[in-house]
Amino acid sequence: MSAAPVHLQRGGVSVVLARDTDGIPRVVHWGAALGDLGEADLTGLADARRPGVSHSAYDGPRTTGLVPDGTRGYAGTPALSGHRVGGNARAVTPSLVAWDVHVDGDASLTCTSTDDEAGWSVRVGLSLDDAGLLHARTSVTNTAAGDLHLASVLTALPVGAHATELLDLTGRWCKERSPQRHPWVQGTHRRDARHGRTGHDATLVMVAGTPGFGFGAGEVWALHTAWSGNHTHYAERTPEGECLIGGGELLDPGEVVLAPGETYDGPRVLGSWSGTGLDAMSHRFHAHLRSLTPRVRTERPVIANSWEAVYFDHSLERLAELADAAASVGVERFVLDDGWFLGRRDDKSGLGDWAVDPDVWPQGLGPLVEHVTGRGMEFGLWVEPEMVNLDSETARSHPGRVLRGRAAAPPEWRHQQVLDLQDEGAYDDLRAALLALLDELDIAYLKWDHNRDLTDAVHDGRPAVHGQTRAFYRLLDELRDAHRTLEIESCSSGGARVDAEVLSRTDRIWPSDTIDALERQHLQRWTSLLVPPELIGSHVGGPTAHTTGRTHSLRYRAAAALLYWFGIEWDVSRLDEATLAELQEWVALHKRVRPLIGTGTLVHPDHPDPAVVVTGIVAEDRSEAWYVVATVAATATQHPAPLRLTGLDPDRRYRLTEEVPRGIGADLSGAWSGDGAELSGRVIASSGVALPVMRPEEALVLRVVAVG
Ligand code: DGJ
């Protein structure tokens, strides 16, 4: 690159990279598209962003380069750290001064720099995709003698200093991805996830935004670290005025050691900017994740899952009965959950022995698969390949395959341990067992579970999470290569493995073990900050949720699942005719909405009453939209504010109706709710329509169709 700044522009976003006074590249703009800028404009922009020099400070202007670097005076978190064992390199920390910038087209560049004194060569790739999502990745190569022990390789992106609020997510089992919001003050706000999997409490995204930003307003920048092992997201604001959001893998000492010439590629870090709030920010992530799951049809099959229906109560008769009832309401894929394999009569034994249990399934699973496919449904099977119960043939015959850091195994978690996937024998046997199942049975889908954290995980004397995570990816890749139409769901005690890297190899996530419809209203909305709705599994459970004890109407439960990948997890073989008919209506309604879900735009119209949660899906061409309005708390003292629905074309007229499946009475009075209303998209979004007075934990389904 010449000294002139580089302007990447695509998908409504611009990134400008300019050299500082020392020639070090730094991002001077990541945000709104800047249009056609000539060299003079770009140089003007770079100059205008050069800070002044204060007293008692470095003698020249200090800016943070593309790689925040302590040797150049950055006093926040250094992006790179490590140490060398052996060799005679003199410097410890890399100082990257001479940079080569290679520009590839109008939306992609690669910066490389080598510090010979330290023996580090670093590559940072930046590119904008068609939707304006910024892809960044940092790689390190050891260029000197001796081993380079990496401590951290982070990728950080600068955001506007006027972003003074942070939003990140946290959680626990059955409460994944709960938002926490706070002022962005000076210092580092770090969200480390050290679970050996993505984690129930993983933030999913780190968002910085202008005061009061919402789903439909405010300027926001978000970053996602695409990694399913230990990882971090952070936001850092320094006294010098730097504002960065960053992420990367968390490495334990000795976990990644580069021999001379070896390279470490950090995880992909994805950055999404929006000038109009969180929804537009999410759309950039959604477009990317949609492009990663090409094997999946845009219309996801309605699923019935056996878990909360029968748990471990397996028999051909019981499951066939469940499958019959599922088929009768319109289910298209029947998933046999936990409990089918050797010795698995409860959750204390059997993991690791991936052969069908002849005591429960004397003829194997063949007859059930035939029964399911004979009813016109696909068959799916639950597995938890990375885990092992000590009470299993696998653990008894190969105790050395249990991942551990000492003689005693780590504390049990759901009575299970982790299988060391870096042990070649363990990996090969596991792959062979899974391939045998896939070869033998007509399996369209695996629900891939992972029910514990990795604790004291060591392989060959080294911390093992990095290697275990890579081995997991390799296993998925090999199975998918061997079975090219196989779809896989990423489940991990509910939603503890939700990230863009696992979603580049899987086709759906199970966001939580709670299918309580009220909890789901929150959980799904925050999960969809990153994940598009058609990849988020959402099931209709029984009237009383098993995980919370709350009881909801079928209408409320089904409405919560309507706009996502719809499923049923309920013993439908025991339902009366009327309930079955109602459920069938909801499945049919979902199938009407479904063409929009995998291709349309997800919106969350902001409503001033926190008890009202609105979710909508708008067709790509904005000719049609569906909204679910749900109350999630005690009713407010005031009559509800109007509903202002976003996502529509302001210049078109729409007919808005309350859509209720036939035969299901709804007591939702409102001036327009009988015959509907005909209004322009602009009026619906700005003035809104009266929201009928709703009871607590009640749901309303609206359809909006363009007229004329
Ligand atoms: C945890 C999952 O999240 C559940 O959906 C179910 O598959 C159980 N594991 C089975 O053990």
Image (spheres, helix red, strand yellow):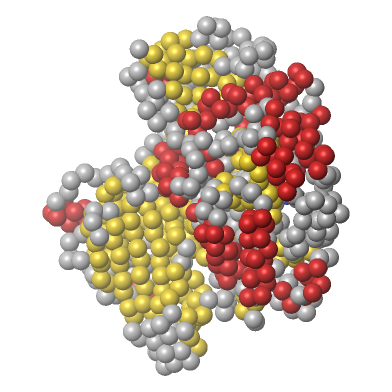
Q: Is residue 114 above or below residue 410?
A: below
Q: Residue at x 63, y 61 (%)?
A: 435
In terms of depth relative to the viewer, which is nearer, 213 or 356? 356
Measured along the vertical axis of the image, is residue 591 above or below residue 422?
above
Residue found 67% across the figure and 69% down from its top? 429
- Percent across and percent down for residue 235 are 47, 56
Give residue 32's quadrant in the image. top left
Residue 224 visible? The answer is: yes
Viewer-closest of 51 and 449: 449
The residue positioned 38% from the left and 46% from the top of the image is: 273
Quadrant for the N terminus in the image: bottom left
- Give coordinates of residue 431: x percent, y percent: 63, 65
Which residue corresponds to the image point at 55% horizontal and 15% vertical from the top-left?
658
The relative height of residue 341 versus residue 626 in the rendered view (above or below) is: below
Vertical placement of 589 versus 215: above or below?
above
Q: Position of residue 681 (x, y in %)?
A: 39, 19
**Residue 525 in sight in this render:** no
> Number of callouts in the render?
0
- Please state if 286 lies on the left or on the right of 52 as rendered: right
